[in-house]
Amino acid sequence: MRKLQQVINSKWIQHPVFWVLSVYAIGNYFAISNLLKFIDFFYSLLFHIPLLFLVYVNLLILVPKLLKKGKYHFYIPAVALLLLVTYGVHELTFELILPALPTEYYMVSFTDAEVLITIFIIYLVLSTLLTLSKSWYKLQQVEKEKLSIELNSLKTQVNPHFLFNSLNSIYSLALAKSERTAETVLELSNLLRYMLYEVGEEKVDIEKEVEMIENYIELQKLRADDSTKVHFEVQGNLKDKKVAPLLFFPLIENAFKHGVKGVSESAFIEMTLNVGKGIEFNIINNKGKVDDLEQGKYGGIGLENVRRRLELIYPKSHEFEIAETEKVFEVKLKLK
């Protein structure tokens, strides 16, 4: 399929197809009867000599060197001169080239100057628009690929320290011969598989995302003190709803990183996911010591990650609010 698309997009296919259709159209336009004959196509081929000159001078010289560079004050007079020269080429074709051909046909250019110039302008405008639209399409594809690369990069920015901390916690469970060791290994395995292989799509089922969030929270809780209160509540109907993958993970990670330190009996994280006509995710947690807030830039990379992904995936259809006091940090995210 991809090779077929490349063949279709090839200029070595597009240009010949365009000119074959053009020869047929011009031949039909100037046909001497309702039934197309060889002489009609022969005339059309001669008629295309100036058209070929016009189109390719415009495409190969004027458009790339003047129009695309914004030199409109040069492009417009250059086009006028090109039309004039093309008219001369047309006259020379029927006055010099045709008589020199070994053919029994005798033809003259019977087309009015106004009609000729109109046809030339149509071909000039059409070829220019097709070229500009193709350039615009290629630019859009490049931008789309760049955004895709950026999105994939943002998806992988869940703190790698989380993996090391989880492995250390599992190691501690194993040393203590805890019954949770096998279950925790499975949770980490499922989460890593999800992060690596199942988030290639722009949107995923929110049911799967919730399952991974629950695994993620359980793994993060291994590092928290027993007195820390962590609560995650899901409201609404999740069936057939989709969301950008790993969108909430940086927010949860920040809550554990900056709020839960295992040194305060009041440490807490409250998370609510409400799914209705839209999606709302609220998270509130206590704040750690001032030194832990990265000199006032609370959240840092994690929050910027979320902001950028929202701009790319939910442009003008989301609300992202941050509120904080001396002791509490809260994030509210709404997807319309």
Image (cartoon, grey):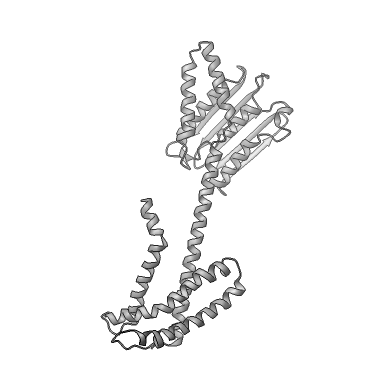
The picture places residue 28, in percent across and down from the top left corner, at: 32, 78
Q: Is residue 240 above or below residue 16?
A: above
Tell me what residue is drawn at x 28 percent, y 84 percent.
33
Can see residue 220? no
Q: Which residue lies furthest to the top in this view?
A: 176
- Relative to the observer, which residue lies in front, 236 or 242? 242
Q: In this view, does 91 lie above or below 192?
A: below
The picture places residue 296, in percent across and down from the top left corner, at: 73, 34
Tell me what residue is drawn at x 37 percent, y 73 percent.
22
- Relative to the observer, which residue lies in front, 164 or 283? 164
- Relative to the observer, which residue lies in front, 34 or 8? 8
Q: In this view, does 297 lie above or below 314?
A: above
Total marks drawn? 0
- Relative to the observer, which residue lies in front, 2 or 56? 56
Q: Which of the 4 quarters of the picture holds residue 30?
A: bottom left
Q: Which of the 4 quarters of the picture holds residue 157?
A: top right
Q: Which of the 4 quarters of the picture holds residue 17?
A: bottom left
The picture places residue 110, in percent across and down from the top left corner, at: 38, 88
Tell me what residue is drawn at x 49 percent, y 68 percent.
129
The picture places residue 46, in percent across and down from the top left corner, at: 37, 80
Residue 151 relative to residue 30: left or right: right
Can see residue 161? yes
